[in-house]
Image (cartoon, rainbow, N blue to C red):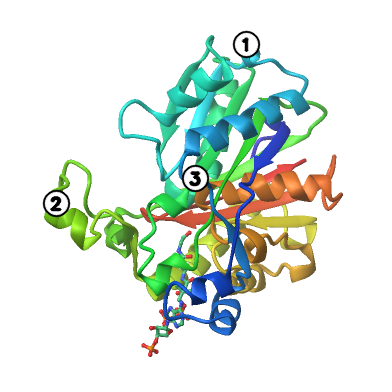
């Protein structure tokens, strides 16, 4: 536990593209139906970015807004960390693309790869920069264009994901507010459960691989589900214990939004009632690493959390990666 928090979230922002893709729309695309999707996932609709809008475009909009809300200029940014499973391209990083778009030219910028857990890993990395005295304003941008890597003919996955971006400015803690503890792990043995097999150096794209869809998201949904609940609950407990807190102390839980049943099971195992859990999955589906910063921004705006609130964030994703961060807002 941090006896005194080192870093806190100074401001947040979100960007969601306007176009709504409903379950009824999906019924016209694959063999599925609204009842199945709602009952098995809790998702009613998700946002889809236009073809010409990239992850960096969405991330830059959220980033500018987070800086503005925090009363900061792009030139104040010391470190820019971008989390994305859908980089604009493989080289250079999407962080450099966002750096250029927002004009934050006096900082170091890099991508952090941890799939849906990216935002929580990035929070801990940002805390480390501040603890080491290597920066005072760390901008985290989680930007995802999941629609560009989803197999739109696979009903088991295409119904789950959406596009969007969230951003958070992390600054040195004040008045005892900030990150209290974190717990992160990963297990590379479980990588085949959720992956994009082709398109990297292990399996460079060929016309045949492209035609087979091997560059798109492949997932063993049921296995990922089981691991997700177990790992998020474990990390949540570990983070709370490290901060000498119990689940009763949690004012609001902001989990990764993959499936309402994953969220409900995690909350139940964690001993946190659903009234204290913030949910966006019904409206946005799974926006990978952007789900938590988008949810934080909405929850603050709606008055569901504010200065002094004890917030527990938990996430899991491809890797597999998972983690939790406890914070006094
Ligand atoms: O951020 C990390 C991302 N990963 C996740 O969020 C994955 C977590 N896992 C899940 O959310 C769930 O496992 C899914 C929603 C992906 C699937 O739900 P499930 O209850 O585990 O379903 P299932 O895969 O066991 O499939 C049950 C049935 C199958 O039919 P049969 O074999 O029983 O006849 C599927 O073919 O449901 C069928 N099915 C569908 N039916 C209608 C699968 N997808 C659909 C669909 N519409 N879209």
Which residue is at 36% across, 53% downward? 319
Figure quadrant of residue 23: bottom right
Name the residue that disc number 2 marks: 207
The residues tagged by marks 1 and 2 sit, at their Cα atoms, a distance apart of: 44 Å
Tell which quarter ligand 1 is in.
bottom left
Give the number of the mark in front: 3 or 2: 2
Q: Which mark is residue 144?
A: 3
Figure quadrant of residue 79: top right
Question: In terms of secondary structure, where does tag 2 sit?
Answer: helix
Give the number of the mark in front: 1 or 2: 2
Which residue is at 72% across, 53% downward? 245
* Earlier sequence position, callout 3 versus callout 2: 3
Give the number of the mark in front: 1 or 3: 3
Name the residue that disc number 1 marks: 75
Between 65 and 147, the one nearer to me in the picture: 147
* Earlier sequence position, callout 1 versus callout 3: 1
Image-based side of 300 in relation to 126, left or right: right
Image-based side of 221 in relation to 218, left or right: right
The residues tagged by marks 3 and 2 sit, at their Cα atoms, a distance apart of: 26 Å
Label 1 neighbourhood size at 10 Å, few (<14), some (14-19), many (20+)?
A: few
Q: Is residue 181 above or below residue 134?
A: below
- Image quarter in which the C terminus is found: top right
Q: Position of residue 214 (x, y in %)?
A: 23, 58
Q: Position of residue 126 (x, y in %)?
A: 56, 29
Q: Ligand 1: does it lie within 8 Å of the C-beta at label 2?
A: no
* Earlier sequence position, callout 1 versus callout 2: 1
Q: Answer whether residue 267 is visible to the viewer in this image.
A: yes
């Amino acid at each position: 536990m941090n006896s005194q928090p080192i870093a806190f979230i100074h401001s947040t922002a979100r960007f969601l593209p306007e176009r709504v893709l409903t379950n009824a729309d999906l019924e016209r695309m694959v063999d599925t139906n609204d009842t199945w999707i709602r009952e098995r996932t809790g998702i009613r609709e998700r946002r889809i970015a236009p073809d010409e809008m990239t992850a960096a475009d969405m991330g830059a909009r959220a980033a500018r807004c987070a800086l503005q809300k925090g009363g900061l200029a792009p030139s104040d940014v010391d470190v820019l960390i971008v989390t994305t499973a859908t980089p604009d391209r493989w080289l250079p990083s999407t962080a450099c693309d966002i750096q250029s778009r927002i004009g934050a030219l006096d900082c170091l910028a890099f991508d952090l790869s941890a799939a849906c857990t990216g935002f929580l890993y990035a929070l801990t990395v940002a805390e480390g920069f501040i603890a080491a005295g290597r920066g005072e304003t760390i901008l985290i941008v989680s930007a995802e264009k999941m629609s560009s890597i989803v197999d739109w003919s696979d009903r088991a996955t295409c119904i789950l994901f959406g596009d969007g971006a969230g951003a958070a400015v992390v600054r040195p803690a004040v008045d005892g507010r900030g990150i209290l503890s974190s717990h992160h792990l990963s297990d590379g043995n479980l990588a085949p459960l959720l992956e994009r097999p082709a398109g990297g150096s292990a399996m460079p794209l060929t016309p045949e691989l492209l035609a087979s869809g091997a560059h798109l998201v492949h997932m063993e949904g049921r296995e990922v589900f089981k691991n997700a609940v177990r790992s998020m609950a474990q990390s949540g407990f570990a983070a709370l214990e490290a901060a000498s807190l119990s689940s009763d102390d949690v004012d609001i839980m902001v989990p990764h939004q993959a499936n309402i049943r994953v969220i409900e099971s995690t909350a139940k195992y964690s001993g946190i009632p659903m009234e204290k859990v913030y949910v966006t999955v019904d409206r946005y589906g799974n926006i990978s690493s952007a789900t938590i910063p988008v949810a934080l921004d909405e929850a603050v705006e709606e008055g569901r959390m504010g200065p002094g609130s004890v917030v527990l964030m938990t996430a899991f994703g491809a890797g597999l990666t998972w983690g939790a961060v406890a914070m006094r807002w």
